[in-house]
Amino acid sequence: MWQLLYENLEQTVSVILFVIGFSILLLQRNLIRKIIGLNIMDTSVYLFLASMGYIQGRKAPIVTDGVLEVTAYINPVPTGLVLTGIVVSVSFTAIMLALTIRLYRRYHTLDIDEIALLARGEDA
């Protein structure tokens, strides 16, 4: 069993990171910590995709030396997905941080439970 985990080290680390990020997302009440947990989850998914797209001994899909065989190159789709995901993740994190700043300025706390209580008090 340990040998299987060691052979798939990148996938194992990505699953562990995903569990850490998910537990932070579920257990923390601070909004900044929740955003950090979400970023850890994102990073673990990118690591998983990159590790699944890499094949030992193959090169990037740039034709050099006249080699046209498909088996000589790696699949570029996982790399493109990772790059697209990183751009979306950075944008989403920026929006979440901006909204967190707005919430802090309005309610003077980052605790999600306190914000919910204060918001209900304003509605009444």
Image (tube, rainbow, N blue to C red):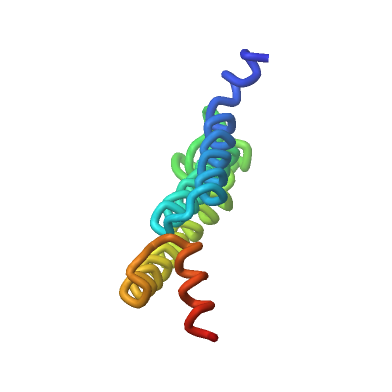
Please identify the quadrant where the C terminus is shown: bottom right
**Can the viewer see residue 73?**
no
Residue 78 lies, with reference to residue 16, above or below; the image says below
- Across and down, in percent, residue 90 comes to 40, 61
Residue 116 lies, with reference to residue 11, above or below; the image says below
Residue farthest right in this picture: 1
**Can the viewer see residue 86?**
yes
Compare residues 82 and 58 and report the one nearer the observer.
Answer: 82
- Across and down, in percent, residue 116 comes to 51, 70
Q: Quadrant of residue 71?
A: top right
- Across and down, in percent, residue 29 comes to 48, 54
Compare residues 76 and 95 and report the one nearer the observer.
Answer: 95
Residue farthest bottom in this picture: 124
Residue 99 lies, with reference to residue 28, above or below; the image says below
Left or right of 33 in this view: 116: right
What residue lies at 60% left-to-right and 38% top-to-bottom?
A: 52
What residue lies at 60% left-to-right and 25% top-to-bottom?
A: 8
Q: How many marks?
A: 0
Please identify the quadrant where the N terminus is shown: top right
What residue lies at 51% left-to-right and 51% top-to-bottom?
A: 42
What residue lies at 47% left-to-right and 46% top-to-bottom?
A: 40
- Across and down, in percent, residue 97 comes to 37, 66
Left or right of 24 in this view: 90: left
Compare residues 116 and 101 and report the one nearer the observer.
Answer: 116
